[in-house]
Image (cartoon, rainbow, N blue to C red):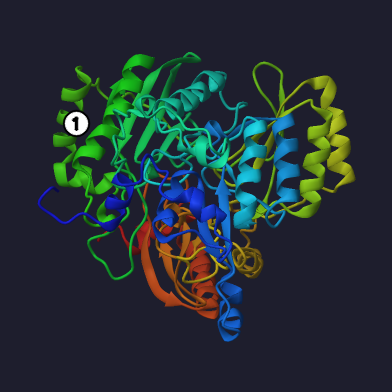
Amino acid sequence: MSNKKLSPTEGIKINSDGLRGTLKQSLKDGHTGNVRPDDEILVKFHGMYVQDDRDRRAERAEKKLDKFYSFMIRLRIPGGIINAQQWQSLHDISEQYGTGTLKITTRQTVQLHGLLKHQIRPTIQAFNTAALDSIAACGDVNRNVTVSAHPQVSPIHQQVYEYADKISTLLLPKTQSYYEVFVDGEKIYDRSSEADPLYEDRYLPRKFKIGIAIPPSNDVDVFTNDIGLIAVIDNNELRGFNIAVGGGLSTTHGNPDTYSRLATVIGFTDTEEKTLKAVYEVLTIQRDYGNRSDRKLARLKYTVDRMTVQGFKEELEKRIGFQLQEERPYTFTERNDRYGWEQNSAGKWYYNLFIENGVVQPHQKEFLYKVSKLEISNFIFTTNQNLIIGEVESENKQAIQALIDEYAIETNQSGIRKSSMACVALPTCPLALAEAQRYLPELVTKIEPLLAKHGISEEEISIRMTGCPNGCGRSYVAELGFVGTGAGQYNFMLGGDRYGLRLNKIYKEKLNEQQILEETDNLLLQYVNERTNGEIFGDFTYRKFFSNN
């Protein structure tokens, strides 16, 4: 890529003095709620995005006021597990700063929205006291490492979960600018300790995501990640990992050079040392060969396709110094969370709470705070935007059940609602073209009677919505996928399977709500009348509309 002009972001990174830029000055500038333009790029590497309330743009513009700027901060929680004391801190911090709302992301962590600029440093300092941080939760680096969230599914969950923390630590940027700018204030770190053989001063061409799946569950949608690790288990022992590369969902409307891609399995590693080495060197290949001219074409999926899968594998084996073994067999049979109480092989109990599209409602938040004060459990974020109260001893289960009953936490939700997912979208995401998180619950409410009409209310059809084509809600691997194209309009995607093994495709473009409901009604009628024995909805629509393409 050296012969092409670098994107402006590349220069900002290189000249940032280890991601410091002019952030200290920006934070002190009381004339605007924003930071300086270059610092808008750099603040992402510290786990934040600059946002503004798009619902208030017109009103403020009419009054000749600056946009109502605020910040979203996202925590780095590899594997999504925090302890009871950390949940209390998270609760208290969210009450003191931002909007007070906790939002669970599709990458197994939590976001706070609505932080004002003067609140950033005290918020991060409070998180630091709780042993939580937002380092590299955004930006052109490896982001939060996800792991299958259900310890009750496999007795080797803990062993695999530990890989998330090891990988996250291995791939952290070496710069100490996060602590210097946001925690310690004037403390100056020795720059010689910041030499970074992985990221150098360029970092990666684009964001980078890693997910670890523990069969039979593919709750992490492992093939949508830049690197997907699939645990290979035999007789309840971890044998190693199949390694998949080149997944990514983001596209751009009207740009045929962009596309969604599922990761390709390129081999198997049988030791921790080999697995970590392979993961590390995949990033160095992306660092050296990724597109730094066009950020829309900068993800690893494009690098893999440009080099070819075989060419990429050969380059990786050259860098790691050993050959990958042949892919080992595995099977995925589920992707949804397991709601309610379940027990693991060691006798511990886990309660999976349904949190619609990741927005923790006030009564749920109060309930979870009460649970955390008991200090008899941990808390596990899931990649389906839900939360598990985990590691509960049998003698403590009733204390939590009493709170479940008191706060009416158990609700009888439909299969399709429990299989729903949405990105944040409006009003805070600057890329959103349409609603998602605020609207999908309403749309599901209108689809539920259609399922009842056709006698399939219990069907757990996966339904996902994103407000733009970037795919943060993983709408491209849903049975019913909706991708925003404009206000109140969505591309209707069909043909994805239930376990995240096949991308869906555009069925109809730019539909409004009435058209979506009419099409869904018709599709469900065809499904009921024409499906084969045991055929799920996504497989039916793929067979009917796309299998001959």
Q: Does residue 148 appear anywhere in the picture?
A: no
Relative to 190, is 426 on the left or the right?
right
Q: Which of 336 and 119 is in front in this view?
A: 119
Classify residue 174 by image quadrant: top left
Q: Position of residue 130 (x, y in %)?
A: 67, 32
Q: Mark 1 points at which residue?
A: 313
Q: Which of 493 and 98 is in front in this view?
A: 98
Q: Residues within 10 Å of mark 1 (few under 14, many from 20)?
A: some
The structure residue drawn at horizontal position 41% and vertical position 33%, both measured from the top left corner, is 175
Q: Quadrant of the C terminus?
A: bottom left
The structure residue drawn at horizontal position 54% and vertical position 40%, both measured from the top left corner, is 134
Instruction: State the SS at label 1.
Output: helix
Q: Does residue 440 appear anywhere in the picture?
A: yes
Classify residue 400 by image quadrant: top right
Relative to 324, is 16 on the left or the right?
right
Q: Is residue 174 above or below residue 53?
A: above
Q: In this view, does 421 lie above or below 81?
A: below
Relative to 83, is 8 on the left or the right?
left
Q: Which of 191 and 214 is in front in this view?
A: 191
Q: Position of residue 6 (x, y in %)?
A: 21, 54
Q: Where is residue 148 in the image (x, y as percent from the top left)?
A: 52, 33
Identified by mark 1, the residue type is: Lys
